[in-house]
Image (spheres, rainbow, N blue to C red):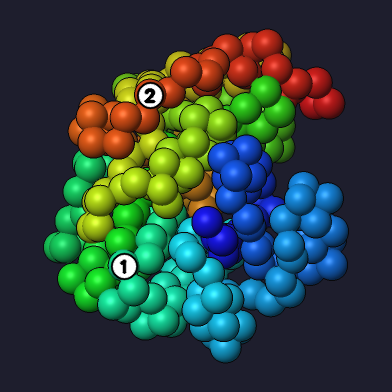
Amino acid sequence: MRVFVTGASGFIGSAVTSELISNGHEIIGLARSDESAEAITKAGVSALRGSLEDLDILKKAASEADGVINLGFSQDMSNFAQSALTELKAIETIGEVLKKTNRPFVVASGGPNVSEMIDPNASTVPRVESALKAIELAKHGVRTSVVRSAQCVHDENKVGLIAPLVDIAKKTGVSGYIGDGSNHWSAVHRIDDAHLFCLAIENAPAGSVLQAVAEGAIEIREIAEKIGQHLNLPVKSIPSDEAEKHFGWLSRVIGADLIASSERTQRLINWHPTHPDLFYDMDHGHFFDNI
């Protein structure tokens, strides 16, 4: 299969392209910079210069592909709403090209809804509208699927949303959590996550929502304690009215209880996570080596 991948040079995207190549697929990766183009070319991917804002480039690439995976998303948290709007326009553009073709279109999605469904009542939440648009395309002859990755996508070198928590702990001298820290985040190893994207492009039923979750309920307090242990810093609760000052943009999710499950996903598409868990990678990998 000839697969067009946006975000191909990213933390998850690079693992997805490697997984696809291992399964015999040909990859065309969207590259926003010369550095990204060089990185994905070295990985055996054909680089296409452009960004999610280059709608004509997206149209042409999608029309020439047997399937599309959208992993591209700007990480500029200072303008998150604009990033979500750019993503939505890109999905609408690609979707128009793929209508009535029955080609697969896999969309990475975020958002606060942790169930294995997309809540239409949450359409005003950034990125949820993109997921709803993808599901709607299934009614128009596109084999769409939405993959919702855990909050903590990790390997031995990097740990998703843990990285900004470490930076905050280093700057403030405290590894913090809100309240009693009994709220939860979920986690998945980067390779297991990538494998789910590969299964989705190959076999996911049209309109399916897939949850890339290996550990569905890790207490935030335990994460803070692990960071404090490695940085040799005190661990303490941050009052709710001080959360934004302490955590910055991360205050929007640090106090959320995001328990998640992948039971339905595992049954639906025969996906089973097998790689190390979050705390193993934090303890035995290289994440803290240079800190």
| Total count of labels | 2
Label 1 crowd bin: few (<14), some (14–19), many (20+), radius 10 Å: some
Question: Under tag 1, what secondary structure?
Answer: loop
Dot 2 crowding, Cα within 10 Å, few <14, some 14–19, many 20+? some
Q: Which residue is more in the foreground, 120 or 54?
A: 54
Mark 1 or mark 2, earlier in chain: 1
Say left or right for 168 vs 217.
right
The x, y position of residue 90, in whole percent, is 47, 76
56 left or right of 98 in image = right
Residue 93 at least partly seen: yes
119 to the left or right of 272: left
What residue would you read off at disc 2?
272
Compared to 64, does 25 lie above or below?
above
Q: Can residue 162 be seen in this view?
A: no
Residue pictured at 32% horizontal, 29% vertical? 270
- Residue under the image location 31 percent in, 48 percent down: 204
Residue underneath mark 1: 102
Q: Quadrant of the C terminus?
A: top right
Question: Which callout, 1 or 2, points to the residue nearer the camera?
Answer: 1
Residue 185, percent across and down?
Answer: 39, 31
